[in-house]
Image (tube, rainbow, N blue to C red):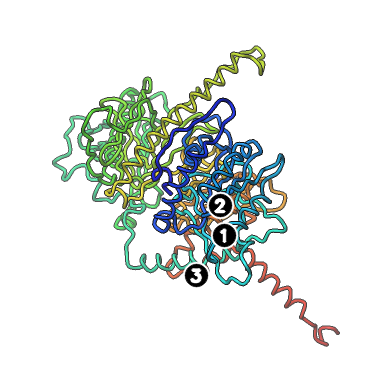
Amino acid sequence: MAIIEALDRTPASVTGSSPAVSPENFIKCMRKFYRHWKEDETEIWGSSCAIAVATPPPSEDIRYQKSLALSTWFFGHQFLETIMVFLSRQIHFLCSQKDSDVLKPSKMLVSKEAGVDIVLHILKKGDDGSALMDEIIRAVCAHSESNNVVIGHLAREKPEGKFLEPKVLTSFISKADSDAFYLFDEENAGLPAVKQAPKANVMVPVKPVKQLQSEILKKKTSEAAVRSDVADHKLLEGLGRSRAMDELVAYKNANDVPVSNRLDIIQVDKQNEAILLPIYGVTVPFHVCTIKKAEIRGESSSGVYVSITFNVPGTASGLQDPRLQNLIFLKAVTFLSKNRSHAEEVIKSVKTVQKGVTERARRASLVSQERLQLCDGMSRDRIQFPDLWIRPSFGGRGRKVAGTLVAHVNGFQYSASKTEKVDIMFSNIKHAFFQPAERDMITLLHFHLYNEIMVGNKKTRDVQFYTEVMDVVDAVGLKRHSARDPDEIEEEQRDRARRKKINGQFELFVKRVVSVWSQPRFQQLGLHFERPSQKLGFNGVHGRTTCFIVPTPSCLVQLVESPFLVTSLREVEIVCLERVALGQKSFDMVFVFQDLKRDVVRIEVIPMASLDKIKDWLNDSNLKYYESKLNLNWRMVLKKLDEPGCDTNDRWEFLNPDATDSDSEDSETDDDKYEPSEAESA
């Protein structure tokens, strides 16, 4: 709720070391507040019967918060770690003894002049404030004129403090009421924190895990049925397409083959991307893409052996044209060369031509992007961030150079030099992440794209820009260091200041970019920066290295170590937790996607202590998960499930341990009912 913008600002007055509240200023501001509340009760305040403002605890960080600004505007003093609940005729304060002493002198005058009573609830030492909060909630319920209690609060401000924790409000609703309504701020809701076990004397209205997982399974099954119906009427194009025979033509006819005076020499035609091999006195051309491997293999007194292996049908990298399956192919040839330098030059030329063909094929497979529209105006008016590194890097030898990221009209452009540039269109961004340096050495911006782009000579779908907040490698001397060493303390303070400064620069850049994305022309793209939740993170092995993996509102990511991990949760069909058994110290997690032709994502060696936390996160993310005591061969499983005619309703039932247990129980029951006949007894 935009409270601060609707209210005029009044200078704060603080006298000496002991703050005092000006009753006249408080009454003036309070009347403006209540007048605005009454005039815009439905449109802005959501027909709320009470307004709750919770201020944060003391902090060394310099930051702007609406609750503190409102406290300063009202009283000329910041009431820290205080809850203020505004009713039509009362204002309840849950505060410390020191803050209550500041408010007491104004109680009588405010009640007399404004007709509003100030009710103080003093928080004692060691008290969590739950009993006092119960009194405030009872007062709100008693003050409400209707059965529907609506409490307004400051949006986009995260509650902080030891007693600002979730509270069960339904315990005060009468059992005679058949309906209860909840109002949530879904627009700014992020991932929920790790759930804590409720107290024994509190009834928490949470669905059982089995019931919740059953509902998720029904939803996933219906979605899979819809996708199956659509797939029956469409051909999947471009998935795993291999190079066809018609594309591998070096010469259109025999007259185009170069004529050589020598028929006993291997030649490489770089212009036509072909290698000419002398076979039985005839020069035979082969396109370089038909060559799987070219190498020097062994040598003798007469010379060296040049071995050339070809791609043939029936191999993983071979030609998959159906017209070629019944033909006879040359698989490998070996030549004896007396000139070793010529043999090495031939191998080098073949690899160079193959590299150029591969590079051209990569660029040809890229989806064409719209043209970047450069923004006009002075450089100081542009949204730009200098001194950023990029991953993957441009490559090449020599010292790496940092570049500048600039947000233009319809996309980003990163430039490290006049020739090294990367364009990222807004329309090609699938997910955008901002991860400040909290437990890592870098602060980063990461973009996961719909279609691959070229960064240097590399084709990638993930582009990252980062800055190191401190040196990753720190030289440590041999002498002992004291914890009270002034130099070390000063160095730590400098590191904290640098980390805070860099994080602030990134946050400012992100806010300016989000303001561009909020324009009407980009709203349909749904672009926003996601921030990983470190509290929900866990350790695991991805890409042969142990890393810290964290969830975001829509993804599971690992953005610090290469290779990166970005798993979009809306594309996930099920999650399988493998090696979950008694006595195991770790388990594996496998993400199976809705597109069964896509390889699964596997995270291994996750500590067993993170199992309950991960299950809670999967439930909150509406993901169906199964448990398995063994690792599965997912390539064979998905191939079987993707066969035509496979039932989409019960295809995951083989992973359900309950179904397996029920079958075994039925068989045991049948065995118990079996009685031998008289003949068998004899």
Q: Which secondary structure lies at badge 3?
A: loop
Q: Which residue is mark 1?
A: 143
Residue sitting nearer the eye, 639 or 186: 186
Residue appearing at x 56%, y 49% in the figure: 91
Mark positioned earlier in the residue sequence (1 or 3): 1
Of badges 2 and 3, the one in the foreground is 2
Quarter holding residue 504: top left
Residue appearing at x 19%, y 42% in the figure: 251
Query: Residue 99: where, in percent of width, then height?
Result: 61, 37
Instruction: Identify residue type, mark 3.
Output: Asn
Instruction: Identify residue type, mark 1.
Output: His
Q: Which residue is mark 3?
A: 649
Residue appearing at x 60%, y 58% in the figure: 169
User: With respect to residue 45, does 516 lie above or below?
Assistant: above
Q: Which residue is mark 2?
A: 90
Residue sitting nearer the eye, 20 or 308: 20
